Amino acid sequence: MATSTSLLLLLFLSQPWAGTHAETEAVVCTGTACYTAHWGKLNAAEAQLHCSKNGGNLATVRTEEEAQHIQRALAQLLQPRVPLAPRMGKFWIGLQREKGKCLQPSLPLKGFSWVSGGEDTFYANWHKEAKSSCIFRRCVSLMLDLSLSPLSSPLPKWSEGPCGTPGSPGSNIEGFVCKFSFKGMCRPLALGGPGWVNYTTPFQATSSSLEAVPFASVADVACGDGDKIEKHFFLCKEKATDVFDWGSSGPLCVSSEFGCNVNNGGCQQDCFEGGDGSFRCGCRPGYRLLDDLVTCTSRNPCSSNPCRGVATCVPGPLGKNYTCHCPQGYQLDSTHRDCVDVDECQDSPCTQECVNAPGGFRCQCWVGYEPSGPGEGSCQDVDECAPGHSPCAQDCTNTDGSFYCSCKDGYVLAEEDNTQCQDMNECEDPEGSPCDNTLCVNTQGSFHCGCLPGWELAPDGVSCTPGLMSLQPSAGPPQGENTGDREGRFVPSATMSSPTGDLKSTSKVAPTMRKPSLLLNISVTLVPLKTLAPSEPHGVGMEPSNYHPTATTSHEESTGGDFMVQQRDDGTDGQKLLLFYILGTVVAILLLLALALGLLVYRKQKAKREEKEKKPQSAADSYSWVPERAESRAMENQYSLTPGTDC
């Protein structure tokens, strides 16, 4: 009580009182909030500072109903002014987008947020699409025609733009709108006779016509007229939980002269006059008079909807009290007037994952599982490797709740998603080539080893051994030997080099199995490859033949000195590569010869120039000498005068 009295005196002393009406401001109060409209060419930051000094923020416009309250406050602000020429004015509200935060066109607020905090709202009333700039701070204002009454116009549109700087608020900025929130409101005081009342709010706004008066406001009441004025002061305070009252009883400014004729005697419902000029307030059937002797309330305690949210009100006996009940899945909160959701997942009702929902819950399975049946809440493994559904490129192995992919020999998993396979290049193994001093050729899923000319692939399929070369046709097969196919096999090489050199190279060959083909049985038949003509006694001929994996080993003795061994041909690709290397070598040799020839010509020309520069010059060079003696003596020194000779 002492605190309330001190607050009352403080608010009273802070107000100018001269026995006349105080200047009213543009303020609208309803529900649990008040909205004030102000003139002032301020930037957005200065406007927010002005609102926050009195305990508020720039106004929010979260719903259409809230937009209507702000429109009424703007109408009060514009009403006293002389009508202006048609022009648009803007008033700041508390919707802003900070620097570095970009436009989000899919959201109602487009990425903007309220300065007072809170979640994104669904109501929006944009004038046009907001700019997508992310490098500047953007603020929102309400647009309205200053020459028209806002109440006769549609709800003000939202306009976004720069937030302004000190001294430069922005284009067409005329003022701003503030919002102040309160825990509750008192009903306006009703006067039963001549007089007037002014309300001073905690945010220092004064008004004589509030539909609801915020908590902690002071009411200045003056009863009577002329020289006889009676003053009263009242404070809006909380009488009980969510019950706010002025603490006064009976109508104010009662006059026996006017009775119930002025403002219905200050009564909310019925006014009854007495024979002596007095009167009293009454209520209609089903209602009862409250302690202030002015206000009526329903005899049913639930008629005022004291329960909130999903709670339902149940009246008590004799209609003196009530209780709030919650539906299944909810429970009463600490105020016993509202309901909060019950988290059923705390009792682990599901076999795997439980998701709480308002008023209930639902069970769902982990990734890799699916419900085993409707309404059972149990889960079973999903076979990701089922035929036609496997995500793997080659082999798929199902596991409990998951799966993994694998690849066949010669392939490895790609690192992208571990479901695709890619060929493994065995010839580029960091630990070394699988071929032993031979040519290694990678193929899809495998590799192949080959040998250079003069060498043949060993039975192990990865190394080479020296081969034999026949220089002359043999006299024929020895007696007793099989006269079948005696043609040798030749493996074309990819490059011409010494057999003792580096034998590793790469070339394209036909695909083989994962392991290299091993030449377990190599046909090495010593037979004449081509009959030589008498005019070519030293010629050597070779005929490559196709590879035959089932060749057998046989030997035939030759009747005369030289012989040739043909090696197997591993494919036409090797022959083409051999021809390519030979042509490349010939071209390189020709280029070297051309370079040497050019160098020789250059050096000869240079020598001639040097000899010409060193040759001495004399005046006699342009004359011809007539020899008087023998030619042999004159040639000894053709540039010197001979003693005894006439010139």
Image: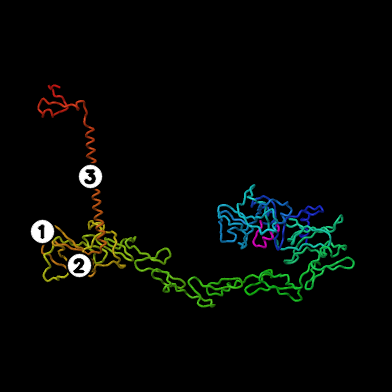
Residue 502 at x, y percent in the picture: 26, 57
Residue of label 2? 523
Near-viewer residue (404 or 477): 477
**Cα gap from disc 3 to disc 1, whole angstroms:** 38 Å
Residue 552 at least partly seen: yes
**N-term-proximal mark, 3 vs 1:** 1
Residue of label 1? 534
Vertical order, 97 against 357 (above or below): above
Residue 357 lies left or right of residue 295; in this view the side is left
**N-term-proximal mark, 1 vs 2:** 2
Residue 155 at x, y percent in the picture: 66, 59
Secondary structure at numbered mark 2: loop
| Marks 2, 3: nearer the viewer | 3
Q: For label 2, count other residues whose C-alpha is less than 10 Å away and answer few (under 14), some (14-19) or many (20+).
A: many
Near-viewer residue (448 or 461): 448
Vertical order, 396 against 563 (above or below): below
Q: Quadrant of residue 340?
A: bottom right
Magenta region, residue range: 58-73
**Cα gap from disc 1 to disc 2, whole angstroms:** 30 Å
Q: Amino acid at mark 2?
A: Ser
**Cα gap from disc 2 to disc 3, whole angstroms:** 48 Å
Residue depicted at 16% across the width and 59% down the height: 540
User: Where the N terminus falls, by quadrant?
Assistant: bottom right
Residue of label 3? 597
Residue 516 at x, y percent in the picture: 29, 66
Residue depicted at 65% across the width and 59% down the height: 60
Q: Quadrant of residue 618?
A: top left
